[in-house]
Image (cartoon, rainbow, N blue to C red):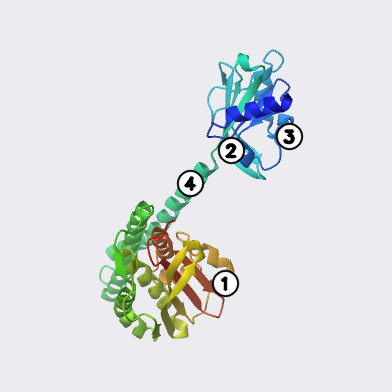
Amino acid sequence: MIRDGHRWASDLLEGVPVPMLAVDGRARTIGANRAAVALFGGGDLLNRPFVTVLRHPAVVEAVDWVLDPDHHPAPLPDPMAGPAQVDGVVRLSAAVVADGRDIAADITVARLPSALGRGATIAVLDRSVTEEAEQMRRDFVANVSHELKTPLTAMIGFIETLRGPARDDAKARDRFLDIMAREAARMNRLVSDLLSLSRVQAEERRRPAGRVDLPLLLRGVLATMDQAAREAGVAVETQGIAGSQPVPGDPDQLVQVFQNLIENAIKYGGSGGYLGVSMRRIDHEPLLRGPAWAVEIRDKGEGIEGMHIPRLTERFYRVDTHRSRAQGGTGLGLAIVKHIVNRHRGRLRIDSAKGQGSSFTVILPEGVSRG
C-alpha cells in the first residue's frame, strides 16, 4: 500500500519540469520526479526522512512549519525571495548541496491539497547556470574594461606630455605619436574582435547554408600571409591542399579561422622557422558521425605547457600576457575560432608541449552533419 502511494506521488510530480519532492505528515519522502532524482544523486529517495535528502536548516524549518504550523515557528522573511510565507506557501533562496556540489536554488515549499492527505511538496529551481552566466558576464565586462583602460590611460598620459613638457620636442613628439598610433590600432582590433565574437555567437546555432572550396580557401589565406611569414623567417610547407574539395561552410568565417591560426603560428611559433599546413580526409570521424576533413596548422616553436591548453579558447586568456600584447594580440582570436568551428559542427584539437611546437587541427564535416 505504501509502495502504491509512493508510486502515485512520484507519477503526479513527473509532469513538473523542475526537481520536486513530496513528503508526508512525518516529513518522509513519498514522491520524487526524475529531475529531483538527477539533482540529488542516484539511489532511492523514497521513504526517507526529508532531512537526509536536502540538508539545509532553513528548508527543513519551512517544511516543518508547512506540515505543522501550530507547533513550529513561521519562517523569517528572506530578503532574496520576498515574503517568507503567503497562504501556506514558503519561498526562499538557499545554497544547498546536491549531487556532491553546492548550488544556488530558489525553493518553494507548499502544502499538499487536503484531499491528498497531510504533506507538502518541495520544488527546487537550480539557479547555478544563471549565476554562472552572470559571473561570466561580469568577468567579460571587467576584462574588456581592463583591456581598453590600459591603452587609454597611456594615451591620456602621452597627450598631457605633448601638451606640456614635450610640446616643442620634435623627437619626443614623433615617438609618442607612434606609440599612440599603435595603442589606438590595438583598441580598434579589440573592438573589431568583440564585434566579430558577438556576431559569431549570435549565429552559432544556425549552420552555414553555403559550400566552400576548402583547399582553394587555404591557398588564398597562405598567399595573404606569405609576406608576414617571409619577414618572420618562417618556411612554409604544405601538403594535401592542391585540387578542389567543397565542404559546407561560411567562406568568410573559415578564412577568419585559418588566418587566425596561421598568424598565431607565425607570431608565436615562428622561432622554429617552420609552418606546416596540411589537409587530409578522415573516413569516419566518430564525434561527427561521418567523413570529415582535417586541416592541421603546426609549428616548431616554443610550444605550450599542458596546463594552459584547456583554457586557450577562453576569452582574454593568454599564456604570456606581455608577449601577446606586444604582438598586438587581443586575447579573443582563439575564442572566435572555437565558436566558428562549433557553428560548422566541427572540432578544434590542440596538441602542444613545451619545447616541441604546437599543432592546431580543425576538423570539418564533409557533408551536412546530423548533430
First in sequence: mark 2 or mark 4?
Answer: 2
Disc 3 residue type (three-letter): Thr
- The reply to whether the C-beta atoms of the residues labelled 3 and 4 are less than 8 Å apart is no
Residues under labels 1 and 4: Cα distance? 28 Å
29 left or right, relative to 225: right
First in sequence: mark 2 or mark 1?
Answer: 2
Q: Which mark is residue 52?
A: 3
**Residue identifier under label 2:** 35
Q: Which mark is residue 194?
A: none
Disc 4 residue type (three-letter): Ala
Residue for point 56% across, 77% down: 354
Quadrant of the image occupied by residue 7: top right
Disc 2 residue type (three-letter): Ala
First in sequence: mark 1 or mark 3?
Answer: 3
Q: Is 313 located above or below residue 98 in the figure?
A: below
* Numbered disc in front, either 2 or 1: 2
